[in-house]
Amino acid sequence: MKQRGVALLAILLVVAIVTVLAVGIAHSNMVRLGLTERRQESAQAWHIWQAGVEWSRDILRQDARRNSYDYPGEFWARGIRDYPAEDGKLSGIMIEQQGLFNLNNLAPHGQTSEPDVAVFRRLLTRLGLDPALADTLTDWLDSDHVARPGGSEDATYIAIQPPYRAANRAMNHLTELYWVKGYDAAIVDRLRPYVTVLPAPTPINVNSASKVLLEALLPDLDGSQTDRLWNTLQTEPCADMICVQRLLPSGVSSNGVAMAVAGQYFLLRLSVTYGATRADGEALLARVGGMPSVVWRARGLSQRLDIKNPLGQAELTGGV
């Protein structure tokens, strides 16, 4: 009887072990299956994201065929929200970048541009920031090692732990501001809607510039004149610089800072939802010549998508 009890206990133990192993194997299989599904969803989401980039490039190519100027009321600037794409949903917007102040204009090709420094100082002041930030950034960008009044060169950065040196070259991305003396997250966030970083010196597109940037660009205008100019450009954008000059009062100029009515660079922000997976990313597009090229791509969004007036299904299917 005792032997039978031991045998029964052994059988129960074996059954318990087998059950635990079976449950463990089943759980592992479920985990592996879930990971496989997530990988497949992620791959498909990024496939749709890349398709969105190619679609945007073609939209810009077609826009260049229609006219030679750019303003925020055009088709490409409207954006899309939850557009059906291969069983996923695509949202995104393009922002013309020459309506912003290109920080690399402060020292094009390593040489300081004082007219652009003056514009940036005025922009900082209008945003409630220290205008001396223009000097520290100019020193970061220019090729010399001589500090401007209020600026900072290698000696400042070598004293930091861990030490580093001023870049003395153009920036590649706005996040590089965090390395520059005086710039922190709050200041970068305050600047973000008004500035950009582009791979070449660029004129300011007055058709898409904010009222604040126009004030900094054209300091000889009073407040009411700037308001009238900005309101006019919002509803009747200029097709050429002759139109811009006609809108400006006699004797008013940009004091040596280049202006334009079109843009070559566009920041694309895209978000894709596919199943339980989301793919967010940005790309800088350069429209020079024929088909726009991709300057860079980056995962994640520097700002949330703000699509106020998205294109409708009928507008999208009706062609661009």
Image (spheres, rainbow, N blue to C red):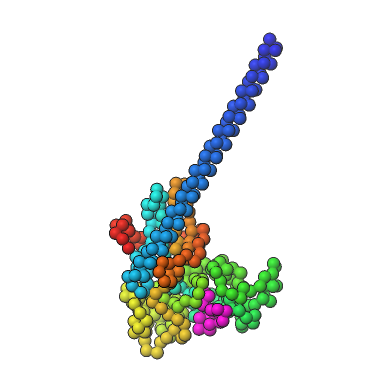
**Which of the image's four quarters has the N terminus?**
top right
Q: Locate residue 9, reporting x and y percent.
A: 66, 18
Picture mark count: 0
Q: Is residue 127 above or below residue 59?
A: below
**Which of the image's four quarters has the C terminus?**
bottom left
Q: Locate residue 207, reporting x and y percent.
A: 38, 75
Instruction: Say which quarter of the image contains residue 162.
Output: bottom right
Q: Is residue 243 above or below residue 53?
A: below
Q: Is residue 19 above or below residue 262?
A: above
The residue that appears at 40% across and 48% down in the rendered structure is 87
Q: Locate residue 281, reporting x and y percent.
A: 48, 58
The residue that appears at 56% across and 66% down in the rendered structure is 175
| In the foreground, 106 or 306 | 106
Residue farthest toward the top in the current orientation of the protein? 1
The residue that appears at 58% across and 33% down in the rendered structure is 25
Q: Is residue 239 above or below residue 61?
A: below
Q: Is residue 128 visible?
A: no
From the viewer's perspective, tell me whether residue 29 is left or right of residue 289: right
The magenta-colored residue range is 103-117
Dominant secondary structure, magenta: helix
Instruction: Say which quarter of the image contains residue 132.
Output: bottom right
From the viewer's perspective, tell me whether residue 286 is left or right of residue 231: right
